[in-house]
Image (cartoon, rainbow, N blue to C red):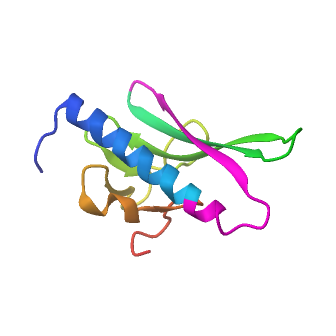
Amino acid sequence: MEERTQEELEWYMEHFTGLIQDCFNKHEKTQKYPKEYTVVVKKGRKYWKILTTSRARTPHGSTNTRIFGFVRREDGAILRAASMKAPEVRTKNPVRGYIWEETAGSTFSWLGINYDMAT
């Protein structure tokens, strides 16, 4: 596998975040009561944590934040979340793809990182 610089990985992470935001925007256009979703990335020592914040489009709409997934900063590996604080790494094949691959957009749906790599 080809090595990527941290600058390249940062750029790909921004692009990947944009793909996730686009996915949410498309999904919400199909909903009867759409919410306003925002994708937020928190940079940790080892991983980027991807969170989504949803807000009901009403004057007093509630806000809800949930974990979407993780990306390993070292190589751009896309990982499902095991909890709010850690990725799922104890499975046989925890990596769902890499943010720099052309197929990175197929590693998730509006529900989160795909459970099965075949979906």
Residue at horizontal 79%, vertical 47%?
Answer: 57
Write the residue at 40% across / 69% down.
Answer: 117
Give residue 89's position: percent from left, percent from top.
Answer: 43, 49
Along the viewing direction, whichever of 15 and 114 lies nearer the viewer: 15
Of residue 9 and residue 84, the one placed in the foreground of this image is 9
User: Is residue 80 among what the camera can see?
Assistant: no
Q: Position of residue 99 (x, y in %)?
A: 31, 49
**Identity of the residue furthest to the right in this view:** 60
Is residue 35 highlighted in magenta? yes
Q: Position of residue 59 (x, y in %)?
A: 87, 39
* Residue under the point 43% across and 47% down: 18
Above or below — where is 19 with respect to 46?
below
Q: Quadrant of residue 30?
A: bottom right
Q: What span is colored magenta in the figure?
A: 26-45
Toward the left, the furthest residue is 2
Front-most of residues 99 and 83: 99
Q: Is residue 27 magenta?
A: yes
